[in-house]
Amino acid sequence: MIQFELLCAGFGGQGVMLMGQLLAYAAAMEDKEATWFPSYGPEMRGGTANCQVVISDTPISSPVYW
């Protein structure tokens, strides 16, 4: 079983979210299991943003929180 757990973090949001989404889509295209969980800060603009990406070759039962 191989499992990768990634945390992408930054400010502003959209680049961070795109990076996480692209990783999850690429894993799915390679017949891997993938989850992508976005998280935004309370600010309307320019706030913190992060996303959690889990990629595995076996089913993923729940998200990972750091």
Image (cartoon, helix red, strand yellow):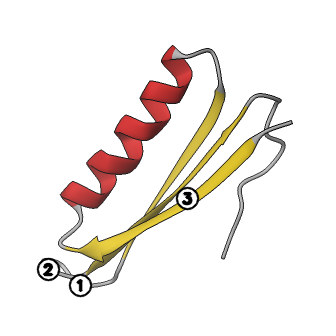
Q: Amino acid at mark 1?
A: Glu
In this picture, residue 28 sits left or right of residue 48: right
Q: Position of residue 33 (x, y in %)?
A: 68, 29
| Quadrant housing residue 25 | top left
**Does residue 26 appear to the left or right of 15 in the view shown?**
right
Count of residue discs: 3
Q: Which mark is residue 6?
A: 3
Residue 43, numbered circle: 1
The residue located at (29%, 59%) in the rendering is 16
Residue found farthest to the front = 2
- Dot 1 or dot 3, earlier in sequence: 3
- Rendered image: mark on residue 46: 2
Q: Nearer the viewer, mark 1 or mark 2?
A: 2
Percent x, y of residue 35: 60, 41
User: Quick check: 20 above or below 30?
Assistant: below
Separation (CA) of disc 3 from disc 2:
22 Å
